[in-house]
Image (cartoon, rainbow, N blue to C red):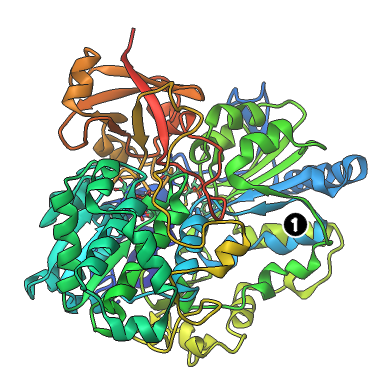
Amino acid sequence: MERLLPSVCPFDCPDTCGLLVKVREQRVVSVSGDPEHPFTRGFICQKMRHYPERIHSPERLTQPLLRGGAKGSGAFRPIAWEEALDIIERQITQTVARHGAEAILPYSYAGHMGLVQRQAGDAFFHKLGASRLERTICGTTAGLGFSHSLGRGPSTDIESTVDSDLILIWGSNTLTTNLHAWPFFQEARRRGARLVVIDPYRNRTAQRADQHLMLKPGTDAALALAMMNVLIGEGLLDRDFIARHTLGFEQLAQRAGEWPPARAAQVCGLEAGQIVDLAQAYGQARAPYIRTGFGMARQSRGGMAMRAVALLPALVGAFQCPGGGITRTTGEAAPFNLKALTRPDLAPPGVRAFNMVQLGRALNQAQPPVRLLYVYLCNPAVVAPDSSQVLAGLMREDLFTVVQEMFLTETACLADLVLPSACSLEMTDLYRAYGHYHVQMARPLIPPPGQARPLLGVFQELAGRLGFTEPVFRAGEEEIISWLLQGGSPYLEGITLEALAQGRPLRVNAPANPYASGFLTPSGKVEFYSQSMADLGLDPLPEGAPSQDDEGLGRYPLQLITPPRHQFLNSTFNEVPALVAQAGPAAILIHPRDAAARDIADGQEVRVFNGRGQCLLRARVSQETRPGVTVAEGLYWGRHTPGGQGINHLTSQVLADLGGSCAFHCNLVEVAPRQ
Ligand SMILES: Nc1nc2c(c(=O)[nH]1)N[C@H]1C(S)=C(S)[C@@H](COP(=O)(O)OP(=O)(O)OC[C@H]3O[C@@H](n4cnc5c(=O)[nH]c(N)nc54)[C@H](O)[C@@H]3O)O[C@H]1N2
Ligand SMILES: Nc1nc2c(c(=O)[nH]1)N[C@H]1C(S)=C(S)[C@@H](COP(=O)(O)OP(=O)(O)OC[C@H]3O[C@@H](n4cnc5c(=O)[nH]c(N)nc54)[C@H](O)[C@@H]3O)O[C@H]1N2
Ligand SMILES: [Mo]
C-alpha cells in the first residue's frame, strides 16, 4: 500500500520546505514539495528530489563501527551498541578522571535542523562540564553586524516582497541557496519591479537578474557608504522617518561625506556612474527591498559590511511601505524556549570555550589538550577552515574521536568510533525556518535502517549510564517539544502541541512588518551611530575599508571566494552519486586575463595554493568572474577532487571582525598549471 505523508526538509537552508513523502512498504519512493505550504508552494530543489536515494543508500551506516586499523585507514569493524556505549562511557570517565571534563569537546552544527535532535547533546555536555563549543561557523558575524544597526528579532517577510518595486539581492545566490524566494521576486517583477544582484561573480541568480553589479569581494561597506553619500547629497531621504526612528544621522552624513562615488568605485572595482544610478534607483523607489545573504559577511570585515548595508532602508524610509525593507533572517520570529532542552544552567561556571572556526587550533594547540572529540551533525574535515590543521588534529593518536553520522564522511573516516544515525524521516522533530514564518512538526514515517538511532536517545542513554537524573535526560521528543512552546512569546500564541501534531505548517504570529513598532536596538531606533559598538572599542559609525586576507597579503595575487555548489548542501549530498555527477568536477572559475597570464587553458587541471595549503581543481576560464577574482563553488568531499583535498585547505582560521564567524570568502591564492 502506498501512502502520501507530510514531513519537513531537515537541511540548513532558509526555505525549510514542507514535504509530501510517498511511502511504500517502509521505503520512501519519492519526495515532493507540499503545494499547500505557503512558502514551498509545491516544488523542491534538485537535491531533495534525490532524498530517497540518500536515505536508502547502500552506503548508509547501519551499525556502530570501531576503528580496526591505523587512524584514517578507513578500516572499521562492526560492533554492538552495548559495546559501543561501554567504550564511550569508559572513555568519558577515564578522560574526566585523568584530565578533567574540559578535555572533552563536543563538535556539532546543522547537519539536521530539527530543534530537538540538533540540540540533543547540549544538556549532556553541559552537565558533564565539557569544554563549550561556540557555534559560530555560519551566521554570527552577519547577525551581529545586522543587529548593531537594526536590532535583533525577525526581519522583513519574503512573502511580502511581491509589492516591492526594486529588489536588491546583495551577497545571496537566491536560485541556489534560497530557491523558494524566487517566485515571490518573480511576482514582484511581473508587477514591474527591477531586480539587481550585487555579487563578485555571475552566479545563477545574477544570470537571471535585470542588472548585475560585479563588485570586488569584501567591498560592500564602501559601496553602501557611497550610496548613502548620493542619497544624502541628492536629498533622496525620508526625513520624517529619520527624525523619528534613527539615531546619529548627522554623524552618519559626515562619514558618508568621506565616500563620494568615485572613491568607492576605485575600492569596489565599479564605475562611479553605476553607484550613482543604483543609489538614485534605491532612493526613488516606492518600496525598495534588500535580500542580504551571508556572502558579504564571510569576509574579514564582514560584520561591518552587513551593518552598513542594513542602514540603507532607514535613510529612505523603506520599512514604511509594504514590499520594502530588508531580510536577513526570519528565524527569530519563532523564539522557542530552547533552554528547557539545552540547559545551560547545568554547566559549571567558567568552563573554557572554543570557537568552532578554530578547530585546527583547538586540536593542535589547546592547553590542556582536547582528548575526546564528540562530533555529530557536522563534517569538520570538510566544512571547517584550514583543513590541514583540522586533519592533523583528527589524526592525533592521543585523541579519541566519536562521530555520530549517516555516512562514512571524511570526518567519520578519521574517527575511533562511528555511531549510525537515524534521518529526518525516521524521527520526531520540530522545525522553524530562517527564510519564512512557518513552523512544522514531523513524525517518523519509516523505521531507521539496521541499528541506526536518533541522537536524542543516544545522549539520553549515555546520560543514564553516567547517573544524570534531570528530566531532560528522560523526556521523549513530544514532551520536549511541549517545553519548547512554553516561554510566553506573543509570536508563538496559538502554536500548541495539538495544533502541531496535525503535521501541517503553522504560521507564527509575527507582524507582517516586524519594524512597525520600532527596533530591538538598545535605543529602540535604527542606530546610524552605535554606542554599543563604541563600547566594544569599535568604530561606532559604518566604516568602508575593504576586507582582506592579511595572511596572504603581498604573497598571493588572486582573491578566492568559496560559495556553495548548486547540487550540494554544504558537504551533504556528496554521498549521492547522481548529484556528484551533476555537480561535475570540482572547478575554479578564473578570468581569461588571469588564465592567459598563467598559461592556463579552459578545462585544464590546476594547482590552487597559498600559505595554508593547496588543492587541485579543474580550471574554468570564464568572464563570469572578474579579473583578480577566482571562484570555487562547493564543498566537495576531498575524495571527489583530483588531489584529495577540498577547498577548505585554502581558507583561514582568522575570525571575522564581529561575532567570530569564518571569512570563508576572503582568501588570497595563486593558481598554476598542474605540473
Ligand atoms: N544549494 C545550497 N543551498 C544552500 C547551501 C548550500 O551549501 N547549497 N548552504 C545553506 C547555508 S548553511 C547557508 S548559511 C546559506 C548561505 O547562502 P547565502 O546567503 O547565499 O550565502 P553564501 O552562499 O555564502 O554567498 C552568497 C553569495 O555571496 C557572494 N559573495 C561572496 N563574497 C561576497 C562579498 O564580499 N560581497 C558580496 N556582495 N557578495 C559576496 C557569493 O559569490 C555568493 O554568490 O545557504 C543555504 N542554502
Ligand atoms: N569554504 C567554505 N566552507 C564552508 C562554507 C562555505 O560557504 N565555504 N559554508 C559554511 C556554512 S554556512 C556552514 S552552515 C557549515 C556547515 O557545516 P555542517 O553543519 O557540517 O554541514 P553539512 O556538511 O551539511 O552536514 C554535516 C553532516 O551532517 C550529517 N547529517 C545530516 N542529517 C543527519 C542526521 O539526521 N543525523 C546525523 N547524525 N547526521 C546527519 C550529514 O551526513 C553531514 O555529513 O559549513 C561551512 N563551511
Ligand atoms: Mo550556513
Considering only vertical position in the picture, is 32 above or below 669? below
Q: Position of residue 670 (x, y in %)?
A: 36, 21
Q: Position of residue 432 (x, y in %)?
A: 46, 72
| Relative horizontal placement of residue 46, taking residue 525 as reference (left or right) | left
| Disc 1 target residue | 125
**Secondary structure beneath disc 1?**
helix
Residue at the far top in the pictured view: 675
Which picture quadrant has residue 623?
Answer: top left
- Which residue appears at 51% of the width and 29% of the height? 551
The quarter of the picture where the C terminus appears is: top left
Type of the residue with mark 1: Phe
Residue at the far right in the pictured view: 97
- Which residue appears at 25% of the width and 59% of the height? 169
Q: How many marks?
A: 1
Q: Position of residue 653 (x, y in %)?
A: 56, 37
Which picture quadrant has residue 6?
Answer: bottom left
| Relative horizontal placement of residue 477, taking residue 561 as reference (left or right) | right
Q: Position of residue 146 (x, y in %)?
A: 45, 65
The quarter of the picture where the N terminus appears is: bottom left
